[in-house]
Image (spheres, rainbow, N blue to C red):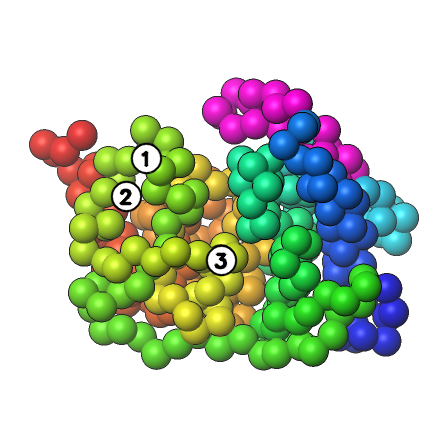
Amino acid sequence: MDVRDLPGDLDLDLALAAALSGAELGLRYFAHARELARDPKLDGSVVTEADLAVEERVRAVLLAARPDDAFLGEETGVLGAGHRRWVLDGIDGTLVFVEGDDRWQTLVALEEGGEVTVGVAVLPAQGQVWYAARGRGAYVADVVDGRVTGARRLRVGAPPGSLGPVRAAVLPPLAMVPARYRAEVEPLVEVVEVAEWRVHGALLVAAGELDLAVQVGGKVWDYAPLSLIVTEAGGVFGGDRGQPHPVTGTGLFAVDEATAEAARGVLGKSRRPGNV
């Protein structure tokens, strides 16, 4: 990678370099993804050797430059402790990865004092990278031969005003939503226009293409980088009860707080007396 193509923030530069290095390795595995062994995890998801290898590659790049920082990875676990912590997911979307679907991501975020200050999402099979640094805006760019080029500023769209005309993404795809979350998302699906997504719905909110994205079953490594990209594009992020980062479970990315609050109200119906 040519560092002259990067944004000039040292932590963001490093996050991009690490994520792109991992993405390059991920693409090698993706070429024969359907042949990879799929090992079940306790939460019902699956893991492959690619998940671990990519995450280890990303962490190695970061660790070489920031040996005193802490790390949290979906597969590689916790390393160190302190004010600065890198949050990693080598292959976000393993279920689509192993099916040859190009919507998987490599995710990297930096937290400082619990606040996300850098977020990077690479879509290796689509040749794109989405990134943000706190106070510096959010961007999408192309990745050509390992180089970041053609960056475009991201901005959310105009608030829809009500749930009626809201275009929303549900993640994972509805057919793959675990049974324990169906009762939560079904009331929302009935009152919004559910959209297909070519990249993670949060990124489409940041790009002004969707009003809302709801992800179920997420963890801190799923949400940390995407939350910053959306908020730096002018949107909002939080949990299904309004909790801020970090969120485990259901997370909402929205064009504005009114849209998020309306969606939380509908999602909340599944938790009220008389609902299952």
Tell me where residue 236 appears, x and y as whole percent: 42, 64
Instruction: Look at the image and give the residue range highlighted in magenta.
Output: 37-56
- Residue type at tag 2: Val
Image quarter for residue 77? top right
Residue 181 disc label = 1
Residue 130, position as x, y percentages in the image: 62, 64
Q: Nearer the viewer, mark 3 or mark 2?
A: 3
Whole-angstrom CA distance, mark 3 to mark 2, is 20 Å
Secondary structure, mark 3, is loop
Q: Is residue 128 left or right of residue 237?
A: right
Q: Earlier in the sequence, mark 3 or mark 1?
A: 1
Please name the residue shown 81% across and 64% down the image.
Answer: 145
Confirm whether residue 74 shows in the render: yes
Nearest the viewer among 21 and 237 is 21
Q: Which residue is mark 2?
A: 185
Where residue 20 sits in the image (x, y, percent)? 76, 56
Crowding near pointer 2: few (<14 within 10 Å), some, many (20+)?
A: many
- Which of the image's four quarters has the N terminus? bottom right
Q: Secondary structure at mark 2?
A: helix
Determine the residue positioned at 43% across, 66% down.
205
On the rendered structure, is 169 left or right of 154? left
Residue occupied by mark 3: 198
